[in-house]
Amino acid sequence: MNAEEILKYHKLKNTGCRKFIITALLQKDLALSENEIKQSLPDLFDRVTFYRSLKTLEEYKIIHRIVLHDAVVKYALNREILPEGDHAHFHCVKCDSVTCLETKLKSPTSLPDGFSVNSIDVLLEGTCPECKGK
């Protein structure tokens, strides 16, 4: 699917900024920070438009946010190939890439009484295959 098809599928208005964000994430096939997304076409959209577009795409579950241990936020597309529900992310400490892992996570089986799980965030850190081979 391309950006226009994704927006149409989710019944969202096909704006230039939304298309730009989705296209950037499709092209790289990795999670990207706001600055990494804006890098390819700087100053094309004002800050407010850009952040509203990110928020809308996140609300419609087209993208999801990944918060790294150093508080950097990256965004990735929610892909049909990923299992439904929560999944883990892998952060390469050498090249700073973030990849969605296709492994479905299950909530902990034993929680104290009264607790319930709404979501699970798992971030694995290490070295990706490309950096390991260098």
Image (cartoon, helix red, strand yellow):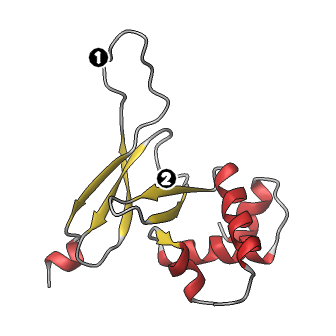
Circle 1 SS class:
loop
Q: Quadrant of residue 37?
A: bottom right
Question: Which label is found at residue 95?
Answer: none
Residue at 36%, 31% (x, y): give it: 106
Using the image as rendered, state which of residue 15 and residue 38 is in the foreground: 38
Residue at 76%, 53% (x, y): give it: 10
71 to the left or right of 8 = left
Location of mark 1 (residue): 110
Location of mark 2 (residue): 81
Q: Position of residue 17 (x, y in %)?
A: 74, 75
Q: Are marks 2 and 1 in contact (CB under 8 Å)?
A: no
How many discs appear?
2
Q: Position of residue 7 (x, y in %)?
A: 76, 62
User: Dot 1: within a 10 Å radius of its alpha carbon, few (fewer than 14), some, or many (20 or more) residues?
Assistant: few
Of the two numbered discs 2 and 1 on the same chain, state the one appearing first in sequence. 2
Q: Amino acid at mark 1?
A: Ser
Q: Quadrant of residue 25?
A: bottom right
Using the image as rendered, state which of residue 41 and residue 3 is in the foreground: 41
55 to the left or right of 86 = right
Rounded to the nearest angstrom, the CA distance separating label 2 from label 1 is 29 Å
Circle 2 SS class:
loop
Q: Amino acid at mark 2?
A: Ile
Q: Is residue 30 above or below residue 88?
A: below
